[in-house]
Image (tube, rainbow, N blue to C red):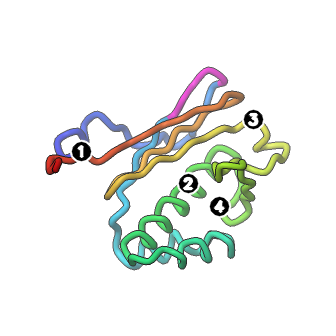
Amino acid sequence: MKGFEHLWRLPPVALFLASTDVHVWRAPLDLTDSDIQRLQCPLSSDEVQRARRFYFPCHRRRFTVTRGGLRRILSLYVGMEPKQLRFCYSAYGKPALVSTSSTVRLCFNVSHSHELALYAVTYDRAIGIDIEHPRTNFA
């Protein structure tokens, strides 16, 4: 994805999500060990256990970074520490925030592929986002 950095803005100091807005965030997944450790700290015990079930270390690391990033991003919208956020899951495993007075309307979706994650955040409506790493070696 080199060359597209100019299309992405840094988040504003005061983050505001209007009821008709959709915010899209992107994050690199291949980080330093210290960055991964920092993102792992707010994960719940079930998230840590889920990460440990991945066979390949790179998949464990990417899950940890994706979920830690999700917690950090959502915490900016709801005014809670990332560790305080609680998730529930649909029958298909899609996460949603457990409703509180500040989180009840916030909706999000996450997609990741190889070294990049995308996050979409909005209010009061289901949202989806998808990213796929392009393949050039079709057999």
Quick one: SS at disc 2?
helix
x, y percentage for residue 135? 21, 47
Q: Quadrant of residue 67?
A: bottom right
**Mark 1 or mark 2: whose residue is earlier in sequence:** 2
Is the residue under label 1 in contact with that under label 3 (CB below 8 Å)? no
The residue depicted at 48 percent of the width and 37 percent of the height is 129
Q: Which amino acid does label 3 sit on?
A: Arg
Q: How far apart are marks 4 and 1 (CA)?
A: 32 Å
Residue range highlighted in magenta: 19-23
Q: Which residue is drawn at 14% across and 51% down?
A: 137
N-terminal label among 2 and 3: 2
Q: Mark 4 points at which residue?
A: 82
Residue 70 - label: 2
Near mark 2 (Cα within 10 A), the count class, few <14, some 14-19 or many ≥20, is: many
Within 10 Å of disc 4 (Cα), the crowding (few <14, some 14-19, many 20+) is many
Does 8 sit above or below residue 133? Answer: above
Q: Which of marks 1 and 2 is in front?
A: 1
What's the residue type where badge 2 is placed?
Leu
Using a 10 Å C-alpha cutoff, classify the residue at mark 1 as few (fewer than 14 neighbours), some (14 to 19) or many (20 or more): few
